[in-house]
Image (cartoon, rainbow, N blue to C red):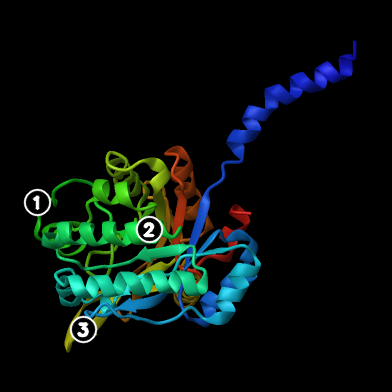
Amino acid sequence: MNYSGVIFLLVFLIISPLAGTSQTILEKLFYYVEHPESYKSFSQHLSQVDILAPQVFRLNRRGEIEGRVHPQILQMAKSHGIKIMPLVVNSGFDQELIHRFLQDQKAQSYAMNALLNLCQQYGFWGIQFDFEHIPAADRDLFTAFVKATADKLHQRGFLLSVAVFPRTGDQPLDDPYHRWYYENRSGVYDYQALAQVVDFLSIMTYDQHTGHTTPGPMAGLPWMEKVIQYVLKQAPADKVSLGIPLYSYHWFAGVIHGEGRGTGRGLSHEAAWQLLQKFRVDLQWDTDNAISWAKFMNNDIMEYLFVENARSFTPKIKLVEKYGLRGFSAWRLGLEDPAIWKLIQ
């Protein structure tokens, strides 16, 4: 008997399940914009991007699709086997525009034909809808348009995904901000109905705190997990892509529409480090929310900075693995901590 062969087989059978679980394949979607930072990041990490989602197409109220994917980006993606799924946004994220569009069957038909033509002409993998600021009252109209578009694209072998605002329940929380958020941001998305007709949902699990709120994490881990748990009650895990912010956020005193008030801005990891160096402060670690942050005085006013980096990226990826999600959708290339690329080889 060949004992060495038996031993090898036993060892293989023992370790192969472990190897399989440690090499979970996650679908990696990265958003892209026409900016030198995005281009530089994309060109340097071609082998680590599965899907490129350029935010380049705009929908107007007549159903016309404006914009283009730069030919060089198309060529780079195709030559490296990267799937291209451009975003289509309601121009300017205009609420009135998208409201009127959803009531106009002629405009919707025109848009669907235009999207199919774009996919066929440029060889896109599919399209992602990034329609934002839609009134919650338009939920059924939006779902119907998504279904009609998905049917049209699927007939020709193209995919449709939808970027959706996050929420943690069926109804808004009982305070003015969350009622406004539900009625104007998150309430329009029927997760269950959408998941039944599209190929996947990119849950925008970021902007938990913004310039509209008090300072805080863009995507605190407990909040992200609550969103995931709620979404999975209505959509299968293999149709859920977890949104991950790559940007940092700075809260400061500013002037908005001629009035002094607190506000905030998103910024790149590099810009965040420049602020830390300017004010000579070190990052602290928020263990509960799994994010780095700092505060500092600027002309006698306290300012806050929350920083997404490789350390905060890691637990978010673990959430994807924990819940068996299809992957992640990261906003956006060019804003990230360069160290994250070592984590997704």
Where does the image place residue 310, in percent across and percent down from the top left? 53, 57
> Is residue 276 something one can see in this rendering?
no
24 left or right, relative to 104: right
- At x 39%, y 47%, the residue is 239
Query: Closer to the N terminus: mark 3 or mark 1?
Result: 1
**Which quadrant, please, contains the N terminus?**
top right
* Residue that mark 3 sits on: 256
Where does the image place residue 296, in percent across and percent down from the top left? 37, 70
Q: Disc 3 or disc 1, which is closer to the eye?
A: 1
* Residue that mark 1 sits on: 174
Where does the image place residue 116, in percent across and percent down from the top left? 39, 69
Q: Which quadrant of the figure has residue 141?
A: bottom left
- At x 56%, y 76%, the residue is 73
Where does the image place residue 114, in percent across and percent down from the top left? 36, 75
- At x 10%, y 55%, the residue is 175
Up-down relation of residue 200 to residue 20 (above or below):
below
Which kind of residue does numbered mark 2 sit on?
A: Ser
- At x 62%, y 34%, the residue is 20
Question: Disc 1 to disc 2, how far (Cα)?
Answer: 31 Å
